């Protein structure tokens, strides 16, 4: 799979990046508008009246908000636009009855994986990532199912797409054993082969196993793989309406044992909504000590992690898109402002301080959660920025519109080309 520079892909190595100066840019926490200079893929200066240079270009952004680009730490990219192939009872089971039937819903949704082929998965994934870039979402942690039904088709597709879009959207491919490791024969070896094929992150879903002992073994096996390949871990944990599910705790303890603080990410944790407060207090302290951040996707299920309580106890929390038009969620367009807008309602976070925190949860906190360094507007930092058609965070969230300009790796992306690519038919 190839991507021409005119469509937003990486330029040839011999083509220098032009100097770009954003004039009259409003930055969060900075009183007066200023200029931001970008060169060779990095922010090189911030201040009033910056020189453009003989080969440079200036864009007057007219006092609009400029921030680091958006980050989606959780997207099932191999499943995008497969909702029409799925049995509707999967979504009904996942959302209904207090998520008591979530395990059965996952089993129903898994049936479509017998149709998996790398070709159509890749085409749909590129469409989804074009939408991501169009909405200023330049870093995505993307899950690829690995099991007896899916084989390695999803991993092969997403690794190819990652390379095709390098320089536009940075993709971290997660090898994900959706149907378990202990209860799914051959899944562990498929996971190992996925890492050999180039997957970046070891995924896990220990709560799906049949017993608590198997869940603990699932966690241990995932960390074994992560250590073998020097990879991070991302696990979907306790994703059902059962207060007895405690795999978040198992993951945090294993993170401490393996001394992998900052390299393990907990997703969903929906059973947390039902935990008694004394246990939550203990769990939050464990997560904080282990350096495990939590990704919440409150718009894709009726239960969600106790975001406010976690934040109050010093745990890093970020937001994910999770799904786009698949068996679990009908909507989605890789627009993280839209995700934060929905979260503001679902989490009752609407004060000025709440809105600023939500914005962090789709930018700097999400970046930290997936191991991105220097995701900020600062001299020397990578130039991955958005220029919003809004003067502040409140107005950006109110409209959740696509940015006016998106800068990836120091280059101004061609939004018209991205719109055309995002309009491609679903495969």
Image (spheres, helix red, strand yellow):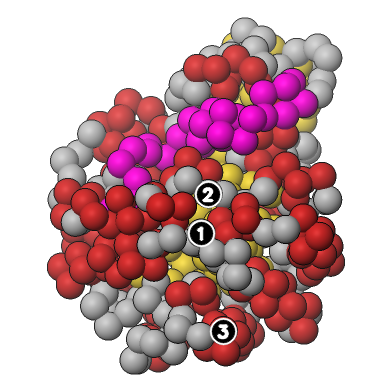
Give residue 424's mark. none
Q: CA distance from mark 2 to mark 1?
A: 7 Å
Q: Is residue 70 left or right of residue 332?
A: right
Of the pair 137 and 177, the residue shown nearer to us: 177
Q: Nearer the viewer, residue 328 or 317?
A: 328
For disc 3, the marked residue is 212
Helix, strand or loop at disc 1? Answer: loop
Say what secondary structure mark 3 lies in. Answer: helix
**Among the two numbered marks 1 and 3 on one chain, the one whose residue lies closer to the N terminus:** 3
Q: How many marks?
A: 3
Coordinates of residue 77 in the picture (x, y in percent):
36, 56
User: Is residue 20 inside the magenta stretch?
Assistant: no
- Residue at mark 2: 303
Please tell me which residue is depicted at 58% across the width and 59% down the height of the picture. 271
Whether tag 2 and tag 1 are in contact, CB under 8 A, the answer is yes
Q: CA distance from mark 1 to mark 3?
A: 16 Å
The earlier-in-sequence mark between 2 and 3 is 3
Image-based side of 131 in relation to 203, left or right: left
Q: Which residue is mark 1?
A: 241
The N terminus - image quarter: bottom left
Residue 319: percent from left, percent from top: 58, 45
Residue bounds of the magenta highlight: 327-354
Is 50 located above or below residue 99 in the figure?
above
Residue 172 on image: x %, y %: 50, 61
Packing grade of label 1 (10 A; few <14, some 14-19, many >=20) is many
Q: Position of residue 363 (x, y in %)?
A: 64, 40
Q: Local crowd at mark 3 within 10 Å, few (<14), some, or many (≥20)? A: some
- Confirm whether residue 18 shows in the render: no
Q: Depth check: 312 or 140 in front? A: 312
């Amino acid at each position: 799979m190839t991507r021409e520079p005119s469509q937003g892909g990486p330029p040839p190595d011999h083509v220098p990046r032009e100097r770009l100066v954003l004039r009259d840019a409003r930055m969060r926490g900075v009183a007066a508008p200023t200029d931001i200079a970008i060169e060779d893929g990095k922010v090189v200066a911030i201040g009033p009246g910056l020189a453009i240079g003989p080969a440079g270009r200036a864009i007057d952004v007219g006092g609009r908000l400029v921030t680091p680009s958006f980050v989606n730490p959780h997207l099932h990219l191999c499943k995008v636009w497969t909702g029409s192939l799925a049995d509707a009872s999967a979504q009904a089971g996942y959302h209904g009855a207090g998520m008591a039937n979530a395990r059965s819903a996952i089993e129903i949704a898994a049936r479509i994986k017998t149709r998996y082929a790398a070709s159509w998965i890749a085409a749909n994934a590129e469409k989804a990532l074009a939408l991501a870039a169009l909405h200023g979402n330049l870093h995505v942690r993307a899950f690829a199912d690995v099991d007896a039904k899916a084989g390695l088709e999803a991993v092969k597709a997403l690794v190819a797409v990652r390379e095709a879009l390098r320089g536009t959207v940075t993709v971290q491919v997660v090898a994900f054993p959706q149907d378990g490791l202990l209860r799914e024969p051959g899944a562990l070896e498929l996971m190992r082969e996925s890492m050999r094929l180039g997957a970046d992150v070891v995924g896990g879903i220990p709560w799906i196993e049949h017993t608590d002992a198997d869940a603990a073994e699932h966690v241990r096996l995932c960390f074994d793989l992560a250590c073998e390949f020097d990879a991070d871990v991302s696990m979907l944990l306790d994703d059902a309406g059962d207060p007895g599910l405690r795999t978040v705790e198992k993951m945090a303890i294993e993170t401490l044992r393996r001394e992998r603080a900052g390299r393990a990410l907990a997703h969903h944790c929906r059973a947390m909504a039902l935990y008694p407060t004394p246990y939550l207090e203990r769990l939050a302290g464990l997560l904080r000590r282990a350096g495990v951040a939590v990704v919440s996707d409150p718009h894709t299920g009726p239960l969600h992690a106790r975001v406010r309580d976690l934040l109050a106890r010093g745990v890093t929390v970020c937001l994910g898109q999770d799904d786009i038009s698949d068996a679990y969620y009908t909507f989605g367009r890789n627009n993280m402002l839209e995700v934060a807008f929905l979260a503001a309602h679902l989490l009752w976070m609407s004060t000025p301080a709440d809105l600023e925190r939500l914005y962090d949860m789709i930018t700097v906190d999400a970046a930290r959660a997936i191991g991105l360094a220097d995701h900020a507007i600062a001299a020397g930092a990578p130039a991955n920025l958005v220029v919003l058609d809004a003067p502040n965070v409140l107005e950006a969230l109110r409209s959740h519109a696509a940015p006016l300009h998106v800068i990836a790796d120091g280059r101004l992306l061609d939004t018209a080309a991205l719109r055309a690519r995002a309009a491609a038919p679903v495969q």
